[in-house]
Image (tube, helix red, strand yellow):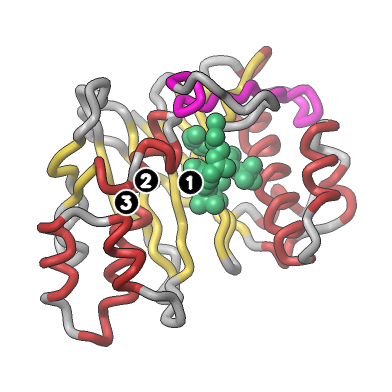
Amino acid sequence: MNCDVWWAGPGQAIDALLGLLDDRERERHGRFRVQADRDRYVVAHALARLTVARAAGCDPRDVAFTLRCRGCERRPDPRPEPHGKPRPAGTAEGLEISISHSGARVVVALARGVEIGVDVEEVSGSRDIDGLAEYALTDPERADLAALPEADRAAGFFGYWARKEALLKSTGDGLSGGLANVAVNAPTEPAEVTAWNLPDAPEHVWLTDLDAGPAYRAALAALTPGPVAVTSHDGAQLLAL
Ligand SMILES: CC(C)(COP(=O)(O)OP(=O)(O)OC[C@H]1O[C@@H](n2cnc3c(N)ncnc32)[C@H](O)[C@@H]1OP(=O)(O)O)[C@@H](O)C(=O)NCCC(=O)NCCS
Ligand SMILES: [Zn+2]
């Protein structure tokens, strides 16, 4: 199968992109207090519509998404408002997408007929890596992380995080699936899932790291035995409208 990965950044936010969003998205966009958050959001959601429209051969204004949070489906008290993994509906039905944004990176992954998850994380040296590792990593992962040279540890941690979150986004669980329930190999090795401790874990999963530049870690997961042919694209031209 094929997967297209479209990259952009918050610097590409222009007013006209807001016109591509639906009412719910515009309302959410208006609630962000920080300009950078607003810009990442509008670029990500406009890019999602533009790439889906391109693949479906329709107008971006005709692209609609349904939202599904698998975590909420398991809970007795699901959040009432629509949220979760976007899935193209209507004319674009059959396509699958995943959205992520962090720092100066926005990414949209797009495939046909196979659920996918993408995640990009800015490597931050100022975060409490040990505390985060306690929450997000399994014991063997923490041991592998501790074996890395000190200078590589923050990037190593965000490598784990991106892989795990890509996996949890492919199923629609999101973080409520539990980062420590899914285990991957050391960040120095080509990405692989080593364990998935949930009763309804997917039978087949394919995982790869993506190159988002030295200050970022990114990963792509697909619920298929694979292989997956990944093509990266620059979203700038699509976003210039
Ligand atoms: C959204 C989540 C997947 C991770 O978010 P993050 O690392 O902050 O953000 P990313 O940029 O990597 O991904 C965000 C995108 O993932 C998508 N997404 C949201 N929930 C998702 C889910 N359950 N599965 C797959 N994708 C999801 C959305 O498109 C979202 O874009 P948006 O925030 O611009 O609307 C999520 O698990 C999370 O952070 N949850 C926090 C708690 C929460 O709000 N839970 C709500 C469910 S009850
Ligand atoms: Zn939910």
> Hey, which quadrant is residue 155 in on the image?
bottom left
Secondary element at tag 1: strand
* Residue numbers of the magenta segment: 56-74
Q: Are marks 1 and 2 in contact (CB under 8 Å)?
A: yes
Q: Residue at x 82, y 50 (%)?
A: 31
Q: Quadrant of ligand 2?
A: top right
- The residue identified by callout 3 is 163
> Hey, which quadrant is residue 153 in on the image?
bottom left
Q: Position of residue 67 (x, y in %)?
A: 61, 25
Disc sitting over residue 131 in the figure: none
Measured Cα–Cα span from mark 1 to mark 2: 9 Å
Q: Are marks 3 and 1 in contact (CB under 8 Å)?
A: no
Q: Tell me the amino acid under the disc marked 2.
A: Leu
Q: Position of residue 1 (x, y in %)?
A: 33, 28
Compared to residue 34, the image places residue 71 above or below, namely above
Q: Earlier in the sequence, mark 1 or mark 2?
A: 1
Disc sitting over residue 5 in the figure: 1
Q: Position of residue 193 (x, y in %)?
A: 18, 43
